[in-house]
Image (cartoon, rainbow, N blue to C red):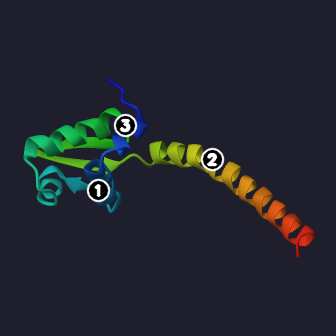
Amino acid sequence: MKRDIFQAIADPARRAMILLIAGGTVTQHALAEHFDMSQQAVAKHIGVLIDSALVKKTRTGREVSYTLEMQKLDELEQWIATFRSIWASRFDQLGELLTELKQENP
């Protein structure tokens, strides 16, 4: 089941997991040590990140590790950049309006 990327990053624990995994490949055990929750809860959160294609799971023997899928984060950044430019334009327009008002009413 594919999940929405925004649903995946909505939870603070999952955002923290993304930050940890962004530092490099992290084993399931090492990841679980950083959180005050059960292994099952960590696995559930990781499952959401995997379903949204933000994280890739790799099994080597009995060890499970996770890596970040940078392409999906790039897609998210591009989407956010669209709105960043819209807001920058609006702030520029507001700045121009405030300058005009200041000149009209010194």
Q: Earlier in the sequence, mark 3 or mark 2?
A: 3
Viewer-side residue, 19 vs 62: 19
Residue 60 in sight in this render: no
Viewer-side residue, 43 vs 90: 90
**Alpha-carbon distance for marks 3 and 2?**
19 Å
Dot label at residue 16: 1
Q: Residue furthest top?
A: 1
Specify the quadrant that holds the N terminus.
top left
Mark 1 in CB contact with mark 2 (< 8 angstroms): no
- Amino acid type of the residue that numbered disc 3 sits on in the rendered structure: Gln
What residue is shown at x 88% (from left), y 70% (from top)? 105
Instruction: Tell me the residue that label 3 is attached to.
Output: 7
Residue 97 found in image quarter: bottom right
Instruction: Tell me the residue that label 2 is attached to.
Output: 83
Q: Is residue 28 above or below residue 44?
A: below
Dot 3 alpha-carbon crowd within 10 angstroms: few under 14, some 14 to 19, many 20 or more: few
- Amino acid type of the residue that numbered disc 1 sits on in the rendered structure: Ala
Residue 58 found in image quarter: top left
**Alpha-carbon distance for marks 1 and 2?**
24 Å
What residue is shown at x 88% (from left), y 65% (from top)? 100
